[in-house]
Amino acid sequence: MGVVRRIGEWYGSWRLQARLTLQIVTLITALFGLLLTVVLMIQEAALHRTTQEKGFSLVRIFAFSSVQAVLAEDFLALRELVRSLVRQPEMRYAMILDLNGKALMHSRMESTGRIFHDPVTRRALAATQPMVQETRSGGEPVHDFTTPVLVLNERRAVARIGISFANEARLLRRTRNAILALGLLTLAGGLFWVRVHVRRLAAPIQALAEGAESLSRGDLGRRISVARQDEIGGLADAFNRMAESLQVRFQLDRELSSSLNLRTVLDTLVHHARRLIRGDLAFLVCCEEEGKPAAVLAHTGTVGKAVRSWTIRPGLGWTGRVLAEGRPWLLCPALSTDDPAETRVLAEEKVHALVLVPIRVRERCLGVLAVGRWQDGPFLPLAQEVLERLADQAAVALANAMAYREIEELTRSLEIKVAQRTAELSKANERLQELDRLKSEFVSNVSHELRTPLTAIRMSVENLADGVAGEIADPVRQYLSRIGSNTERLTRLISDLLDLSRIEAGRVHVLPETIPVASLLRDVLDSLRPVAAEKGLELSDASADRSLRAVAGRDQTFQVLTNLVGNAIKFTPVGGRVTVAARLAEEQGSGGAEENSPLPPGSSAPQQFIEIAVEDTGEGIPAEELHAIFDKFHQVRRHGRAKAQGTGLGLAISKSLIELMGGRIWVESRLGHGSRFAFTLPAAEALTPTVPQSLRSV
């Protein structure tokens, strides 16, 4: 099946001329092959029949003439009789045999007296009536005719003659050659006829194919000229009508899509409707509100004034009937009976044939599209179908234009409302900015004002605890210790508020320097190791590379690390572990702050960063809290536990500081599996010797 399919595909790829030529040649060859076979069979049968009749006649005459000579054993008479027979050109031999197969007389004298024992002779000796056999004589096929020599109905001898096939074969060859010559001439004539007529047939088909290809490429102006009145001419005419229809619709779609102005849309519709079905005039009626009278909104080809002021009432006249019923009408002659206004319009425009189709939008007849003709003769049903399809486009265009008009009205209304709301929001935003500025100033001023008395309180408490005012009792010392710890807590709160206020106001100054990361981690861990020891926590540095260096502000980095490690110690239960590690990273990862990168603008060098991570074995952070973990004043809520001590500003300050130094910070945590806070800083090896101004002073 695969081979047959491939052969079919290969044959299908031939051109039409080649396929028709092959079919004609095959048909002529098959016909003449069949004709040659049948003619040769008929001629051969006729020749065989003629030869047999002649042979039987001669052998009977030969047998009858030899009776006296056989009885009298007159060999001279037999010899003369045999010689007279073999004088005929097709005769190959003649003989008289006795019943033992002995040749009493033979046309070849050397065979006279010879006894024949071959199968042909044995069958001839056994024959009781005339018979014919095929044999060979001298390498040539012959018919051997045999008949008994009867004397008083008693067989006395056998007469045999041999007639050659040569004449028959020669005649058959002549007939075959004549038929073959005729076949070749017919084949040549057929090929010539095929070439001429296939060209005539293929030329318009090729033109149709090229025209279809042009249409597929967008050349809608292509037309085909075929001077034929047969099916191909009809096909070419249908192609031209299709191309014209496509061109008109394309132009219509392009013009409709280029403008949403209702007047322009309607004028375009009636113009193309008149052109598409070859009318003399066209008009479009539209009813914007259901049940209300309609009016002519667009017309073309009209000559009178009545059509401009024509008011159409649904159900009255042909146009009103189409508007009310939503059914198309073909009118010829176009006569109105119950609407005087329509009668006046049709008479003024001299309309003899009219086709009207409804324009439907959402199951409602919104209008009527009509095309009229001045001369006699009705529109064909095809014109109605074309106009109905155009009416569908008109419905879409009308709906779009009306929707656009509504949208314009809504847009104007919305623009007014948006302008009002924008002005209100602008005033509110200015008020909020003013309030935010006042808040920042208030926090800054209050913090500054609070630091001085707090410092005095802290120093007074320390002096009292040191015995400057004399010895104090143990209960008083406990109260002083409690006052001192709360004073320190309040001082940290004020420091956080001041830091956040300076960051938001853009007054934080970062002094970048090359920081040995291992030394920085050691300082942070040493400062917090006593706090970790109080809770029985293991505090360790797991960095593999001790030679890493980062470019950042040392004080700000120390502050961020102290905050992260302090939080890890705070939220890790007794006996847990807090691990700090640093490594070299090629990228910041997703969400890096490229605008804060310390690399020069436009640099193509690969960015390398130092990633520092603080990992604990605490309870972890719930997934729903991770997105807000770096927000100001946010603290993780845990069910059944008191709120953790602190301001909720540490992580927000850390995030702002890290981003100011060209890095980013993130958290990874699962409830019950601890947390991992990590941040990146530019690596010293990734920077040029000149430190960017953006990192020097922020």
Image (tube, rainbow, N blue to C red):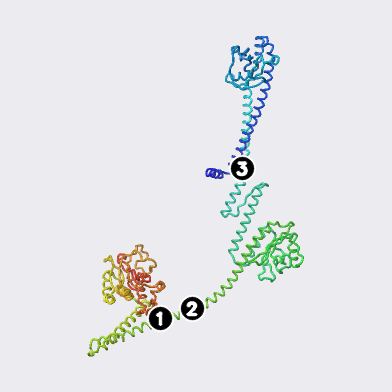
| Residue furthest bottom in the image | 470
Residue at (66%, 14%) from the top-left corner?
156
Q: Are marks 1 and 2 in contact (CB under 8 Å)?
A: no
Which residue type carries mark 2? Answer: Leu
Residue wearing tag 3: 199
Which residue type carries mark 3? Answer: Arg
Q: Are marks 2 and 3 in contact (CB under 8 Å)?
A: no
Left or right position of 340 against 2: right
**If the image is split into quadrants, where does the N terminus sit?**
top right
What is the distance, in whole Å, between disc 1 and disc 2 at their CAs? 18 Å
List x then y, in percent, for residue 103.
61, 13
Label for residue 516?
none
Residue wearing tag 2: 425
Q: Nearer the viewer, residue 288 or 347?
A: 288
| Residue furthest right in the image | 337
Q: Secondary structure at mark 3?
A: helix
The answer, for residue 310, to whether it is visible in the render is: no
Mark 1 Cα-neighbour bin, 10 Å: few <14, some 14–19, many ≥20:
some
List x then y, in percent, for residue 545.
27, 65
Label for residue 437?
1
List x then y, in percent, for residue 339.
75, 67
